[in-house]
Amino acid sequence: MKIRLANTAGFCMGVRRAVDMVLDLQRAEPPLPIVTYGPLIHNPQTLELLKERGITEVRSLDQVCGGTVVVRAHGISPQEREILMEKGVGVVDATCPRVARVQAVIRKHAAKGEFCVIVGDQDHPEVKGLLGFASAGGVAVPDSEATEILDAVPSDRDICIVAQTTQEVRTFDRVVEILRERCGEINVYNTICDSTRKRQSEVARLARQVETIIVVGGKGSGNTARLMKVAQGEGVPAIHVETDEEIGPTLLEGVESVGVTAGASTPNWMIRQVIDRLREIGMSRRTGPLAAVRKLADVAVMTYCWAALGAAGLTATCLVLQNRPVTWLPLGVAMLFVFSMHLLNRIQERSGAVRFNTPEIAAFYARHRSLLTTLAAVSCIMAVVLCSWMGRYSCLLLVAMIVTGGLYAVPLLSRFQVRWLKWKSLRDLPGSKTPLVAAGWAMAAAVLPAIGSGSQIVWSGLIVSFVFAAGMVFWRTALSDLLDIQGDRIVGRETIPILIGVKKTRKLLLGLLIFLASFLGVAGAAGWIPRVGLGLILSTAIFGVFFFVYRKRHLVDRLAVEALIDGNFVLAGLLCLVYG
Ligand code: SF4
């Protein structure tokens, strides 16, 4: 089954901003009691997790009795804001700037005595808040069929018409048309936000290319319901699901292509869970050797066997860059080291972000925990035994790397009750994961073979190969951090994209690729590496293509993304084996 994911699916700017503000607030020292006025996003699982982190929700202002109150992206009315001020509580305003702009339009026209019409759902919190600004009178019109409400709009007064930011364009236009015919002076402001417009036009386009559309989002979410309407308007069956559990094996019987989109407050991991479910259904339809190969490939990626092969490939490239013969011993050590360390950390991480980011993998690890733990331990021992043939110093270095990697997620300091120290384990150090993983791989691929070769170390080759390996693995890990950003944020993990922001991380990734390609070029021209090493510029170009594909969201299958990225290392290693 072909799955196509809409580019615009998931959090809009306003919702993402509100979620980030709340999570940043929660990290403040000393911790503040935080309540949000209404649910922050439409996802019960996430709300439960936020509750565990001390962020609760109140449905009415009567329930507010202290602490800090967060105003959601939908905004509130001036009257509600006044009540909050009177209560003397701290207010953090996460009103989306685009909603604030609509509030300003209504306030301005209400001050001139104009009657305000808001094309939107009267029960929606954004519309309720907007109506509060219509001090000269106003009404919410859900659609052009609401004749009673439309008739009540005074025809002898100046009218200001705005739209709920997530309103459907056609509905807004129809209401404006009706009111133009029956009222005098009308000021029309199409305040449907860009994000909504793009989302709706994309779902319409997608609907023309697939047999069925799946819209992921809360059952009470107005903008999700409108996406359904747009898809159905194109004559395509559309299914609204809140979670992947609603997609039974027979739901898409006979469907060969499906488009997926999501409402503005649907987190990435919920979309991913739905995609995983669709993928599972697609896989269950396949039979024969190809299906078996695909399943095997999935297991290889989930268990880091494929990443281990990638580590072997990277080691081969480092050996070539150092002008050394490619032999199996360093390749084997790097493979076993990478395999065991990733496996151990994933096993320890079972209750963390993995359950949001990659639920399929989390379930796999829960099912095979003891087998995978044994495999990790055996590989660790085998890596040390193999490395002992490379010499004492290599072996000692490897043991030090294993101890550091093994202890990465272990809360070493908690037992000593170090209250003033925020970080109990290496993993808690902000942004530590990506450079540590990069350093671990680069040490295994470039430094261990150099120390264990028995011949003299050529420093130029060692430095170039270390920088190349560390840079490429840094890129790989940071890209995966970008994909996991929403789940990581929710569980409080501080990865590089969370620390410096998504835009800066993207720039960093692009800059890193340009730097690595130029660095190899300079090193080749200066004779620090053999000429064949220049071919590795191709690997950086391949990552450049992945980056483009990631931006366009063409690759919806997370396991496929990981397989392709580590496949780049395998390919580079094979090329080096052939030419080196
Ligand atoms: Fe802001 Fe638009 Fe999102 Fe509404 S849909 S919260 S206006 S970005």
Image: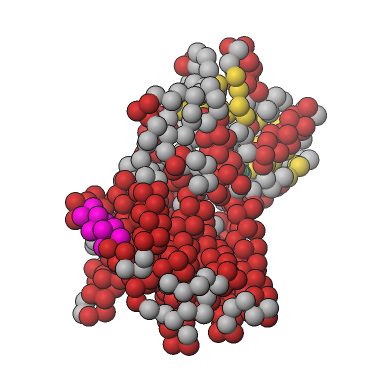
Please determine whether, in this image, residue 562 is positioned above or below residue 172. Answer: below
Considering the image in quadrants, where does the N terminus appear? bottom left
Residue 325 location (% of width, % of height): 44, 81
Q: Is residue 128 left or right of residue 267?
A: right
Q: Residue at x 23, y 75 (%)?
A: 292
Residue 568 location (% of width, % of height): 46, 74
Which SS does the magenta portion mostly show? helix
- Residue 68 appears anywhere in the view: yes
Please tell me in which quadrant of the rendered image residue 297 appears. Answer: bottom left
The magenta stretch spans which residues?
A: 373-384
- The residue lying toward the viewer, choosing from 539 and 244, is 539
Ligand 1 appears in which quadrant?
top right
Q: Residue at x 37, y 35 (%)?
A: 412
- The residue lying toward the viewer, choosing from 114 and 358, is 358
Reply yes or no: does residue 136 show up in magenta: no
Q: Residue at x 61, y 27 (%)?
A: 92
- The residue lying toward the viewer, choosing from 363 and 174, is 363
Reply yes or no: does residue 381 show up in magenta: yes
Please determine whether, in this image, residue 362 is positioned above or below residue 137. Answer: below
- Residue 231 appears anywhere in the view: no
Residue 162 location (% of width, % of height): 67, 41
Please determine whether, in this image, residue 568 is positioned above or below residue 351. Answer: below
Q: Residue at x 37, y 72 (%)?
A: 331
- The residue lying toward the viewer, choosing from 252 and 48, is 48
Residue 311 location (% of width, % of height): 41, 68
Q: Residue furthest bottom?
A: 579
